[in-house]
Amino acid sequence: MNKRHWTVGVIAIAAVALIGGLIWWWTCPEIDAEVQEIFTLQTQMFSDEFRSRPEAERQQLLTDLRARRDQLSERQQRQLRELGGQERGQRMQQQIQAYFDLSPKQRRAYLDQQIHEMEQRRRQFASRANGAGRAGSPQGRGGGGRGWGGPGQGGGRGPRTDEQRDDFKRRRLDSTTPKQRAQMSEYFAALRERREQLGLGR
């Protein structure tokens, strides 16, 4: 995956996550206790404290958590995914609102900071992918047939149909206000334009 495709993908995922988080925030069903605990543990596994632990300990914790996640019902797995969407959506909404709270002169520096962080994540992703390839693991996660995503990303599910994807996007868009959609569009357009100005491509 080249840099441009990775960046476009990150921006698209961020936009979808924001809309999904808004839907979850407004509907907010009661969360199953096991789902909440698994989500909390998954979130902790992206912390510096977890990364500082010995490799064997981290792998064992990941294996144990994956086993617990495998035992979730379809309803619980859906809650876990939606809970992850809530967190990402809230984070992105705060990021966009912070941008519009700034003066026009300050917004460029803010975009530069966001782009710098995106590039850091892209390099880290590429580094992990290269390391997994050298280790010869097809999944790139030290064995196990299921993928390992971020908080709220379940593994082992079959791909959605085109109809399911279209319905998913339509329901999310229907649940946002015109102002929110306009702000999202303006923010991501400014982000793409600034990337081009910095010679990073869209």
Image: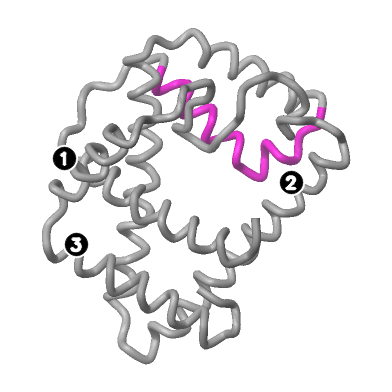
Q: Which residue is mark 3?
A: 180
Q: At 52% from the left edge and 82% from the top edge, which residue is drawn?
A: 196
Residue 70 x %, y %: 52, 12
Disc ID at residue 26: 1
Residue 14 x %, y %: 40, 54
* Label 1 secondary element: helix
| Corner quadrant of residue 199 | bottom right
Q: At 38% from the left edge and 53% from the top edge, which residue is drawn?
A: 91
Query: Range of the magenta residues?
Result: 35-55
| Corner quadrant of residue 100 | bottom left
- Quarter of the image that includes the N terminus: bottom right
Question: Is residue 36 depicted above or below 44 in this figure?
Answer: above
Q: Separation of disc 3 and disc 1 at Cα?
A: 14 Å
* Label 3 secondary element: helix
Question: Is residue 8 depicted above or below 73 in this figure?
Answer: below
User: What residue type is disc 3 on?
Assistant: Gln
Kindly report the secondary structure that dominates the magenta region of the rendered protein: helix
Q: Residues within 10 Å of mark 3 (few under 14, many from 20)?
A: some
Q: Separation of disc 2 and disc 1 at Cα?
A: 37 Å
Nearer the viewer's eye, disc 2 or disc 1?
A: 2
Nearer the viewer's eye, disc 3 or disc 1?
A: 3
* Label 2 secondary element: helix
- Asked if residue 41 lies in the magenta stretch, the reply is yes
- Asked if residue 138 lies in the magenta stretch, the reply is no
Seen from the viewer's position, the closer of residues 125 and 97 is 125
Q: Which residue is mark 2?
A: 129
Q: At 21% from the left edge and 41% from the top edge, which residue is drawn?
A: 23
- 70 left or right of 138 in image: left
User: What residue type is disc 1 on?
Assistant: Trp
